[in-house]
Image: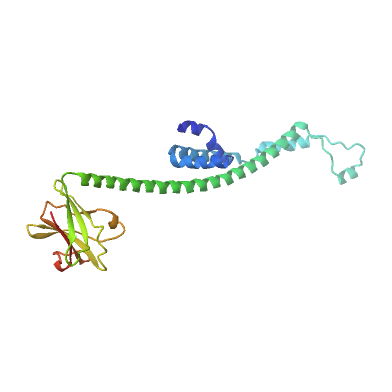
Amino acid sequence: MDIKEYIKSGILENYVFGTASGQERQEVECMSHIYPEIKVELTALQDTIELLAKKAAVNPPDGLKVKLMQAIKSTPQEHKNTPLSKVEDNIIPLKTNKIYRNLAAASILLLVGLGFYSAFLFSDMNKVNAKLSEKATEINTIQNSLADIESKQLAATQELDFLRDLQTVKVVMNGTEAHPDKLASVYWNKSNKRVLLDATKLPEAGLGKDYQLWVIADGTPQDMGVFNIDDETSIALLEMKAVDGGQAFAITIEPKGGSIAPSLDQLMVIGNV
């Protein structure tokens, strides 16, 4: 779509002045969401029209009143044969100059018209301002949502690349005899030492408890980080501490915050590398 041609078409001016059809208004609002250039042009039009309205709403020039009064005073009155006393009791007809009469009428009409036009513009601008503010909020919300989606897509792509890496090893940790229904998996990359944990098959650890991942290297358990199960954990791979290697991975339930050494009576799952 040619954005410049669309802006030159005049539909934006019709939208701002309120003369666009319902379909055209929907089109402009939709296009301003998609193309920032259109939103910028709408704002510029609004500012320009508001400035013109303020400039148009001015008082009549002082010279106009002086000219009108001079024209009235310089016009001779026709009393005919009417006695002076009767003339004073009645309205005296004036023979004003036609040019000044037209000038006065045109000035009055112009001032009245400008007054109505200014009131209309300011009223319409208030509506446009409110609408633009509302749309700006909507655009900001959409932009934030898109940024969040892009961030999640990037993370998902990176995780997929990690899982496809030939240096990544999957270690399945099956439940112990006391917890045969438990299951978890570790993905460990031998090259960059990165470790991702799939704990989607584990239930919540319980009140005041955390899960803790361990790696057993040369018979000694090493802390790999604590975690718990929530809405996000249940659908995502968890980034754990990096490790050079080991013979097995295991998960225990520990007091909130984790322990220095694993509680073997709370061993949930274990798997050999």
Q: From the viewer's perspective, is residue 246 above or below residue 47?
A: below
Q: Is 204 on the left or on the right of 134, as rendered?
A: left
Q: Quadrant of residue 116?
A: top right
Residue 136 visible in the picture: yes
Nearest the eye: 59 or 216? 216
Q: From the viewer's perspective, is residue 224 above or below residue 49?
A: below
Q: Quadrant of the N terminus?
A: top left
Q: Is 268 on the left or on the right of 58, as rendered?
A: left
Q: How many marks?
A: 0
Residue at coordinates 67% horizontally, 38% vertically from top-left? 110
Residue at coordinates 49% horizontally, 31% vertically from top-left? 5
Which percent across, then down, holds residue 114? 64, 40
Residue at coordinates 41% horizontally, 47% vertically from top-left? 142
Q: Quadrant of residue 75?
A: top right
Which percent across, then down, holds residue 32? 47, 40
Q: From the viewer's perspective, is residue 44 above or below residue 228?
A: above
Q: From the viewer's perspective, is residue 122 above or below residue 229?
A: above
Which percent across, then down, holds residue 66? 70, 37
Residue 50 visible in the picture: no
Which percent across, then down, holds residue 127? 55, 47
Q: Is 227 on the left or on the right of 109, as rendered?
A: left
Residue at coordinates 49% horizontally, 34% vertically from top-left? 7
Q: Quadrant of the C terminus?
A: bottom left
Nearest the eye: 63 or 22? 22
Nearest the eye: 222 or 11? 222
Q: Quadrant of residue 214?
A: bottom left
Q: Residue reaching furthest left?
A: 218
Q: In the rendered view, how is the structure colored?
A: rainbow
